[in-house]
Image: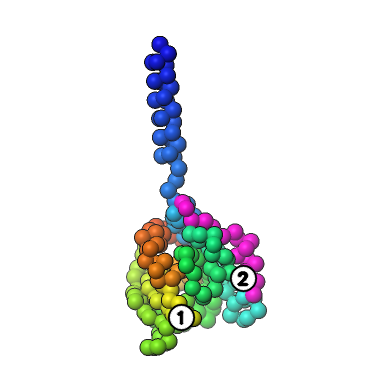
């Protein structure tokens, strides 16, 4: 009797462990209903505290362009593979040895909206780095710069290699205009070339998980 009871208990415990293991999510499902964007981040990645991000952005307001970006931002988050990358490193242009993803939604400035044309590639390609001005020897190599459409959103996918201070890093950038052409949704993933190669599958999983849902309160241009 004891043996049978013990066996049943062992089976029950094993089943409980299996259920708990199966219930652990494999990714963080994150995003913003106000921004109309959602995506998945691997479970072992962590979000940088919003308060640390806000503190790191304080200096942006010292320039007119930076202040305009801050004022027009609807949503902004930073995710990192390792806590060894500080928020200041994540938001700088310096090479990091562990992947970082910066996701944001902002309202386009009036001037930006008036300058939009049918040529999305030309309109969006210089948002992060001056791709159109890249020349041999300046350290910027454009590996991909392709227009695409996604669920009614027009956008651009870029892969860039940039040599800064003798170290080279890879940028994977997705920029999307909402159907009303009033908002910009962007994802910037980056780290050193070696690091990017190691984590390319994770980064692509994040990019491919993007889902978009236009908020009801977004106005037409």
* Circle number at residue 166: 1
- Label 1 sits on a secondary structure element that is loop
From this viewpoint, is residue 41 visible? yes
Q: In x, y percent, where is residue 162? A: 43, 78
196 and 109: which one is in front?
196
Q: In x, y percent, where is residue 105? A: 51, 66
For the record, the magenta segment spans 43-59
The answer to which image quadrant residue 50 occupies is bottom right
Mark sitting earlier along the chain (1/2):
2
* Circle number at residue 57: 2
Q: Residue furthest top?
A: 1
83 and 218: which one is in front?
83
Q: In this view, does 131 lie above or below 10?
A: below
Identify the residue at horizontal 62%, vertical 75% (top origin). 60
On the rendered structure, is 47 left or right of 163?
right
| Residue 138 drawn in magenta | no
- Label 2 sits on a secondary structure element that is loop
108 and 52: which one is in front?
52
Q: In x, y percent, where is residue 78? A: 53, 63
Identify the residue at horizontal 43%, vertical 22% (top origin). 9
């Amino acid at each position: 009797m004891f043996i049978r009871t013990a066996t049943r208990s062992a089976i029950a415990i094993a089943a409980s462990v299996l259920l708990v293991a199966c219930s652990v999510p494999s990714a963080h499902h994150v995003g913003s209903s106000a921004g109309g964007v959602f995506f998945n981040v691997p479970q072992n990645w962590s979000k940088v505290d919003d308060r640390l991000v806000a503190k790191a952005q304080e200096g942006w307001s010292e320039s007119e362009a930076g202040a305009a970006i801050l004022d027009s931002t609807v949503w902004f988050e930073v995710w990192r593979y390792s806590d060894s990358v500080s928020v200041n490193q994540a938001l700088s242009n310096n090479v990091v040895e562990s992947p970082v993803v910066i996701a944001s939604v902002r309202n386009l400035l009036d001037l930006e909206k008036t300058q939009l044309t049918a040529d999305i590639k030309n309109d969006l390609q210089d948002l992060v780095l001056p791709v159109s001005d890249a020349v041999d020897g300046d350290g910027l190599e454009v590996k991909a710069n392709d227009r695409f459409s996604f669920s009614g959103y027009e956008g651009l996918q870029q892969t860039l290699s940039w040599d800064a201070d003798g170290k080279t890093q890879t940028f994977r950038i997705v920029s999307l205009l909402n159907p009303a052409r009033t908002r910009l949704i962007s994802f910037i993933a980056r780290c050193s070339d070696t690091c990017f190669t190691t984590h390319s599958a994770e980064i692509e999983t994040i990019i491919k998980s993007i889902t978009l849902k236009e908020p009801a309160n977004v106005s037409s241009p």
